Image (cartoon, rainbow, N blue to C red):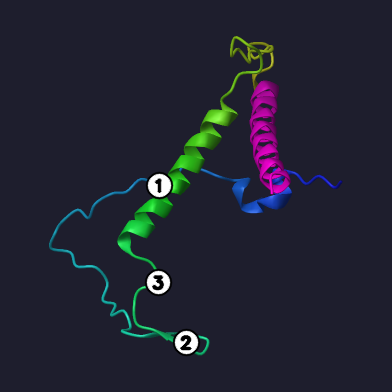
Amino acid sequence: MVRLSASALFPLMDDLDAPPSYEPRPSASESPPAYIFPATLTIGSHRINDPLVNTAQLKGHLSLLGAFYTLRVRVESIGGDSSGNDNLGADKFPTLFDKVTAEARERRWALFVGLAVERCVTSK
């Protein structure tokens, strides 16, 4: 059986950062850029009159993405031993420790995603 790492499966997730924070417009007098959404969309030979997604679906999708981000942060922050203490000489080798812990967090997330994918594939 060939095993793929999470970075091979999801290459864009390697540089995952927190989603940008939303900042409301500084003044209500500023209007958004002018854009008129077409009344009918043509996809292949089909003409679509309704939006492809509605506001509730979009909010649900963004909530799911937020939940995945929160899960990744929680998985990456799990400690190396039962006490949750990952201090393996950080005071003596801070630069090396930062690199090692970053790699350990990435490996933890990759292992978590790999196990989740394997469970989904084998449970069919």
Magenta segment, which residues?
95-124
Which residue in the rendered view is the most extreme toward the bottom? 45
Q: Name the residue under label 3.
A: 52
Q: Is residue 73 magenta?
A: no
Q: Mark 3 or mark 2, which has the lower sequence index?
A: 2
Q: What residue does disc 2 label? A: 46
> Quarter of the image holding residue 14?
top right
Give the CA separation, mark 1 to mark 3. Answer: 18 Å
From where the camera sits, is residue 19 visible? no
In this rendered view, identify the residue nearer to me: 80 or 20: 80
Q: Do the residues labelled 1 and 3 touch (CB within 8 Å)?
A: no
Name the kind of residue labelled 2 in the image: His
Q: Which amino acid does label 3 sit on?
A: Leu
Q: Could you tell me how far apart the alpha carbons at marks 3 and 2 are, in whole angstroms?
A: 13 Å
Q: Which of 48 and 110 is in front in this view?
A: 48
In this view, 48 is above or below 27: below
Could you tell me what secondary structure mostly forms the magenta stretch?
Answer: helix
Task: Give the mark nearer the N terminus: 2 vs 1.
Answer: 2
The answer to whether residue 64 of the structure is visible from this angle is yes
Q: How far apart are marks 2 and 1 (CA)?
A: 30 Å
Kind of residue at badge 1: Ser
Q: Horizontal placement of 107 versus 17: left or right?
A: right
The image quarter containing residue 90 is top right
Name the residue at 70% across, 35% down. Answer: 111
Number of numbered tags placed on the structure image: 3
Task: Return the residue at label 1.
Answer: 63
